[in-house]
Amino acid sequence: MKTYLVTGGFGFIGSNFIRYILDEQKDVFIINVDNITYAANPENLSGYSTNYKFYKTDISDKTALSKVFNENKIDCVVNFAAESHVDRSIADPGIFIKTNIEGTLNLLELSMAHNIGKFLQISTDEVYGSLGETGKFSEETCVSPRSPYSASKAGADMLAMSFFHTYNMPVLISRCSNNYGPYQFPEKLMPLVIINAINDKDIPLYGDGKNIRDWIHVSDHVKGICLVLDKGKFGEVYNIGGDSEAENIDIITYILNKLNKPHSLIKYVKDRQGHDRRYAMDFHKINGEMGFLPEYNIEKGIDSTINWYIKNESWWRKILSGNYKDYYKKMYENR
Ligand code: NAD
Ligand code: DAU
């Protein structure tokens, strides 16, 4: 039995990872460490109780976190826990430093003290900065973050790599592009558009709507993570991408067409400050070394995601009726 400490397991990608690994592998035990921020939802893992344990713990609280390491024999740490929304980082950067940098440092120090066999830092293409019309991010691209969120993720990556070089710790880093799929919190573009369209509500589109993201279905990301865990070389970075670049306006138009909603719902609003223009991932390395290829094309992925949000209305209605209302008002009312 292999024991994984997974942080942020009640969030979007962490919960998809835990469900996948518990469904697919019989010989794993998962310890989920999550302090249940606004982005967490314990319902994401309802029904999962075998080979699974949960600690409501903040990774930036080292004393509380050390209890988890003292009470369990952990083989591998997978760090998903983070403040993850760029717009929130622009409004209030402090918590991003605390969770994404200090939290990662605590995990690294405790993992070293407990001789953990593997430490995977879940990172993002945003650490590379912004692309023009051509080119892609490779693992050799210089890190050049441009938002407080991406700066905090880049800081965490550098700390993780410093533990490999300085202490010979078994560190791996994966960097992925924009995820979408089931259980994504409605603040992010794809679920926001689907939900607003279902509710016949305006869809805020930043700037000229032509910013490009490289979309990947979360299940492809999760499979890439499993490959990195299985076959990754310590001290290496692995890009994971979806091979699906699209302008925001095209994503929104596609969703509106699928839901038979009018394009008049689209409202161009003030641009995000420092808005990165384009992301695109070169993932030759993980493809060549491990055979990774995304299974979803973007149409199939969006169609199944729309269906999931239609079938799971009670999941997102509960979120919409809570604190999210205040967030939405603050972020969009006078934009
Ligand atoms: P999310 O916001 O949906 O979930 C984050 C989870 O972390 C939540 O359950 C939250 O409660 C938990 N958390 C936050 N602060 C914590 C703390 N101090 N202690 C313990 N738990 C804490 O995020 P996500 O979209 O699932 O992203 C997961 C990871 O993947 C992040 O590290 C993010 O940077 C990275 N990533 C995300 C994407 C994407 O498109 N969403 C793409 C690439 C990489
Ligand atoms: O690239 C990986 C990153 O993708 C992850 O590291 C982040 O955690 C994740 O949040 C995501 O960041 P983005 O900023 O790219 O995602 P977001 O869904 O916030 O926005 C996607 C694009 O859509 C971006 O160009 C901004 C635009 N947008 C977003 C929202 C929420 C809008 O036009 N209107 C909106 O209301």
Image: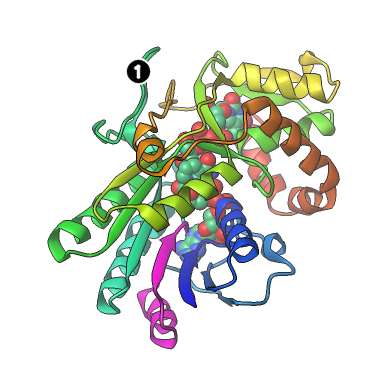
Give the residue at x 40% y 69%. 76
In this view of the protein, can residue 108 be seen by the observer?
yes
Residue located beneath label 1 in the image: 135
Horizontal side, residue 137 vs residue 302: left or right? left
Q: Position of residue 302 (x, y in %)?
A: 69, 31
Q: Is 266 or 245 nearer to us in this picture?
A: 245
Q: In this rendered view, identify the residue nearer to me: 162 or 237.
A: 237
- Residue sitting at the far left: 166
Tell me if residue 77 is in the magenta stretch: yes
Q: Nearer the viewer, residue 86 or 256?
A: 256
User: Quarter of the picture for ligand 2?
Assistant: top right
Q: Residue at x 74, y 69 (%)?
A: 47
Outermost residue toward the bottom in this view: 71
Residue 84 in view, yes or no:
no
Q: Is residue 48 above or below residue 280?
A: below
Left or right: where 249 falls relative to 156: right
- Report the span colored magenta: 60-81
Instruction: Please tell me which residue lies in front, 243 or 42.
Output: 243
The stretch drawn in magenta includes residue 72: yes
Task: Where is residue 99? Give x, y as percent.
Answer: 41, 59
